[in-house]
Structures are given as C-alpha cells and as structure tokens.
Amino acid sequence: MYRAPGRVNLIGEHTDYNDGFALPLAIQQGCTATVRVTDGVEIRVTSTQRADDPVVVPVAELGGVEGWGAYPVGVLWAFAERGVQLPGLDVRLDSDVPGGAGLSSSAALICALAAAVNDLLGLGLSRPDLVTLTHRTENDYVGAPTGGMDQMAALLCEADHVLLCDMRAWSGTPVPFDLGAAGLELLVVDTHARHHHADGEYADRRAACEKAAGLLGVAALRDVSLDDLDAALGRLPDDVLRRRVRHVVTEDARVLSTVELLRAGRLRDIGPLLNASQASMRDDYEITAPEVDTAVEALLGAGAHGARMTGGGFGGCVIALVPPNGVTRATNAVQRAYRKAGFAPASAFTVHPSSGAHPA
Ligand code: GAF
C-alpha cells in the first residue's frame, strides 16, 4: 500500500517540456494504491471514487484501455514494456486530490500505483526510474503530452521543501520551504473553472514552443537566456510566438530567482516573482481564465504577499502566500469578488509541503 501526493507548483509553469525549471511541492492530499497479487490472469482495478466502474483486463492484453482506467492500466503496461512479467493483480485506489483542479490527481494515482507495484514485486526500480516509467504512462499510453514535473513532484518531493526540477537533467533538488518559520500560510483557491478545450490548448502551447525553438536553432527554449531574449524575439515571425517564448524564458529566470531567495531564507520576498509569473501566464502565455484572474486580484487586494495560478491552466487553482491571520480575510475576499462577477463559489484550503510517494 503506497500513498503519493498531489502537488501545487510554486512557480515555473509550462517550462518543464521546454527542458526548463519548475518548483513544485507535494500537498497533503494524495492517492493511496493497495495492490495484491492474485492467482488469476487478470488485472482488476477499483476506485473508491468510481465505485460503479471497475476496470478488468487480461494481463496478456494491457493495450487500448480508455477513460479513467487508462491511468492505472497504463502504469502496468509501462512495467510490462520494461520486461516485467506481471502476475494477476487486484488494485484498489482511493484519492482525495480533487480531479481536474490542476493539482495533479493523475500523477498521484499513477505514482502511488507504480511505487506499490515496484515494492510488491521486488523490482528494485529507483525513484528516477519510476519518474520515467510514469511519465511514459501518461505520454505514451494515456496520450497526454505533458512534461515530467508532476511525476517528479509525486515521487521525489520532501516534507518542508519545494523541489527544484531541472527538466533537462530530469533531476530534482529539495530547497527549504519553511512556511512556519516565515510566518506564512500557502492558501490554495480552487476556482472550479475548467475549460473543456484545455487539453487542446496545452498541446497547442507545447507545439508553439517547439516551433519557436526550431526557428531559433536551439534544442529547447531553455537554451535562450534572459540576455539573449530580445535578440531571439527579434528573429521570430509573429507576435504570438514572441509572447510564448517571452513567458517561458522569463519564467525559467523567475524560478531560479525564487530558489535564490528561498536559499537565503527570504521566503517573504518571493511575492513579486509570483505576481510576475501570474501576469506572464495571463498576458503572454494566455493560459489563465476570468475566474483565475479575479481570484488573484481579490487575494492581493486582501493583503496576500503574492498570488498566481498553479498548474496547467485554463482554470484550476490559484495559490497565495498569506499571513496565518489573513486566511479568512483572503478567502472571504475571493467569495465576494466571485459573487459580484456571477461565478459559482470557489473553495479554499491551506497546504503544507509534504513528502513524495511513501508506504501507507
Ligand atoms: C500540467 C503538466 F502535466 C505538467 O507537465 C506541466 O507542464 C504543467 O501542466 C504546467 O506547468 O500539470
């Protein structure tokens, strides 16, 4: 039985598939996978959240599952692709990560299952191996062209730290993130907004970045430095591509500046970087939503040190750094702004930097 967490990303959005930097932290919400070897020839997966929709597939034919079952079956497929001879398995899943909220409920699920199977079958795969395996599940089986940040967060995060993900090296380095010592809380506001075309928009952003990297003659946008940015923008043919590149290059720089401040014990000072990231996602990358922008404005108006959307975007969650006695004020400000704008109420909760996948 393993539990793997969801995540919020402190800063560094849509940089992972550009070989860049991201800075997620694991949250206390997660998915628990309980796995048992059976003497049958099938994989049977049930989920507390989908009690009436079990998935049963023969071990010998793991391909082609669609819908929610693609995630767990895709993990087992990835093990089989590595040459693992799977026995019949009974898999039970139970998650409290809200789905579709940009908190990586899918990475929590696949990483909990991968860690459990690795342990149960004594496969001895390292955490980085499991990152590769679960990233492959999502890209090659489920068909979602995501970067690797979410899997790295679910497998490598440590309590009281954020994880500096270097997505060229596929390495994760813990950086202290002691909210208590700084006298701060990290508030998550779930806007409940989710654009139905978000998957297509994600793929579109990724394609734009790859096109721009090709035009600039670099392997990935990670290779464009802040110093080179103006010259690079001058070589791109249209304004949309220029704005996409400006977001990625400046966002990478903001991640590294955030890490410097955290290492210097200056957590309170990262607010302006969070705000600049939000503006860049809103104006240059165009991945926020009216509900997101309204929540951010309300949070800043209520005294937050910084606020930004977190995750893939087009809705989902906003994070804000607030003093402990400012949580209620900030939450009320969002609800007031939502009522005024005619949006359905948001929900809000605080998160603590938690550890990656662990035995439950
Ligand atoms: C989603 C993806 F899964 C991540 O890989 C990352 O690109 C993120 O969106 C945006 O930063 O969570």
Image (cartoon, helix red, strand yellow):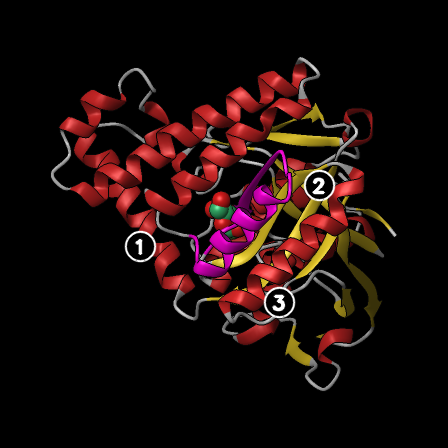
Q: How many marks?
A: 3
Query: Is 226 in front, or is 123?
Result: 226
Q: Quadrant of the N terminus?
A: bottom right
199, above or below 264, in the image: below
- What's under tag 1, amino acid-wise? Asp
Residue 75 visible (yes or no): no
Looking at the image, tell me whether mark 1 or mark 2 is earlier in sequence order. Answer: 2
Could you tell me how far apart the alpha carbons at marks 3 and 1 are, in whole angstroms?
Answer: 27 Å
Q: In this picture, which residue range is highlighted in magenta?
A: 288-313
Q: Which residue is mark 3?
A: 73
Q: Which mark is residue 204?
A: 1
Residue 120 visible (yes or no): yes
For label 2, count other residues whose C-alpha is less than 10 Å away and answer few (under 14), some (14-19) or many (20+).
Answer: many
Q: Position of residue 315 (x, y in %)?
A: 50, 59
- Label 3 element class: helix
Q: Position of residue 273 (x, y in %)?
A: 51, 29
- Label 2 element class: strand
Displayed quadrant of residue 217: top left
Could you tell me how far apart the alpha carbons at marks 1 and 2 are, in whole angstroms?
Answer: 31 Å
Query: Is 30 in front, or is 160?
Result: 160
Q: Which residue is mark 2?
A: 186
Residue shown at 59%/26% (left/top)?
270
- What's under tag 3, amino acid-wise? Val
